[in-house]
Image (cartoon, rainbow, N blue to C red):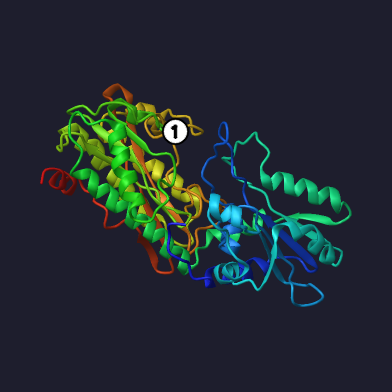
Amino acid sequence: MKYSAINNQLFIDNRKRFTQHLKPNSVALFVSNDILPTNADGSFGFVQNSDLFHLSGIDQEDTILMIFPGVKDGKHKEVLFIKETSELIAVWEGAKLTKEQAKTVSGIENIYWHHEFEKVFKGFVFQAENLYLNSNEHTRRYIDMESAEMRFNKRIREQFPLHTVLRSAPIMHKIRAIKHPIEIEQIQQACNITEKGFRRLLGFVKPGVMEYEIEAELIHEFVRNRSRGFAYGPIVASGPNACVLHYVDNNQQCKDGDVILLDVAAEYANYASDMTRAIPVNGKYTKRQKEVYNAVLSVMKAATKMLVAGNTFEKYNKTVGELMTEELLQLGLLKSDEVKNQNPAWPAFKKYFMHGTSHFLGLDVHDVGFFHEPMQAGMVFTCEPGIYIPEEGLGIRLENNILITSSGNEDLMKTIPLETDEIEELMNK
């Protein structure tokens, strides 16, 4: 892995928090992701199951974690099964973790090889009444293929049909939403790397540059700072492309007079950052571009102040909608009659601001958590209002990452240029 070793106290503490939510006499299982194939003998780069990583820190395939707080021998409360390395693997792929290395990474004492799982697990499973199985429960998830987790859960259900099967996901959503101080350090590092990439761009962008050249500058800066790369598919959208919310072609030339919407950010140690900026191709915003930009910035600043412990998303989203409505009226994009006669289920402002303002951030860009519960200290959210005007070929979205604290919040991207004057100054040095 490119990233520096993470203090294993994070994973020790995370397992303690998870265990506190288990019913008595329960065993929980977590399994790693597949290495997904491409064509011929090719494969995609490995990305670990976020829940398994959160509880163990193990970042390789063929890994299983077993947690059994009530185990009778008192010694196998936490067991890790990892892929056995070999000389052949070491030569062709690079050696996998040894048992001692896995202990160091995870803080788990009992380590077995992956192929020993069936035999070892049968020695403990009949002591338990409940089996907690994990699944990728996410409201935005649309996956047709059968994952390693699905196959594993199916096998366990078939082999032990008389156990009560329970879901780990609600527990994981609860504990992952509240970030450990060590997790916040990783997210902050991802934000810091993102800043380096953005500052690099401000001296690079000019009329005639291709969107993919901007993407290349970013990936260079991210990787040289120990990131695996982008935390998500990068959006480098110039001119009218900015009005396509998930534009990822990044293949057009940036034209003089246009604004580029950049939704680009680095990951670090599997943790995501998520930044959006809108910069002028020629280094100078027009009067209209600056008006729209400042309208979005005004909503962003007001929304950020509302990301505090105790607030609810129902109140938050309602207020943000009201703020955006006022800005759109001032910009002449909405008329008072449209607002007066709007459909409450789809308010008038949605014509120009059709997405949500905030989502959870952590090991996943759209991280897990419960939007129906009040905001709590330790949660990290994006704040990303936007205005999209296809008829003007202009889209502005601004986004920072906000940590909720016991006394308010902290902007983890506060040092990344945001004001139009600062961006223009840096672009014209």
> Residue 284 at what x, y percent from top left?
14, 37
Give the residue at x 71% y 58%. 29
Quarter of the rendering containing residue 122: bottom right
Residue found at the far top of this picture: 391
> Residue 360 at what x, y percent from top left?
49, 52
Instruction: From the viewer's perspective, tell me whether residue 85 is left or right of residue 160.
Output: left
Quarter of the rendering containing residue 420: top left
- Tell me the crowding category of disc 1: few under 14, some 14 to 19, or many 20 or more residues within 10 angstroms, Cα based: some
Give the residue at x 71% y 44%. 150
Instruction: From the viewer's perspective, tell me whether residue 44 is left or right of residue 338.
Output: right
Q: Is residue 210 above or below residue 365?
A: above
Quarter of the rendering containing residue 411: bottom left
Q: Is residue 65 above or below residue 197?
A: below
Query: Number of marks in the image?
Result: 1
Question: Which residue is at the front of the view, 340 or 334?
Answer: 334
Question: Which residue is at the front of the view, 380 or 29?
Answer: 29
Give the residue at x 76% y 60%. 116
Residue 395 visible in this rendered orientation of the protein = no
Residue found at the far right of this picture: 162
Instruction: From the viewer's perspective, tell me whether residue 72 is left or right of residue 403.
Output: right
> Residue 82 at what x, y percent from top left?
65, 60
Residue located beneath label 1 in the image: 347
User: Which residue type does callout 1 highlight?
Assistant: Pro
Residue 429 visible in this rendered orientation of the protein = yes
SS at mark 1? loop
Instruction: From the viewer's perspective, tell me whether residue 30 is left or right of residue 179.
Output: right
> Residue 282 at what x, y percent from top left?
15, 34
Give the residue at x 17% y 49%. 422
Residue found at the far left of this picture: 429
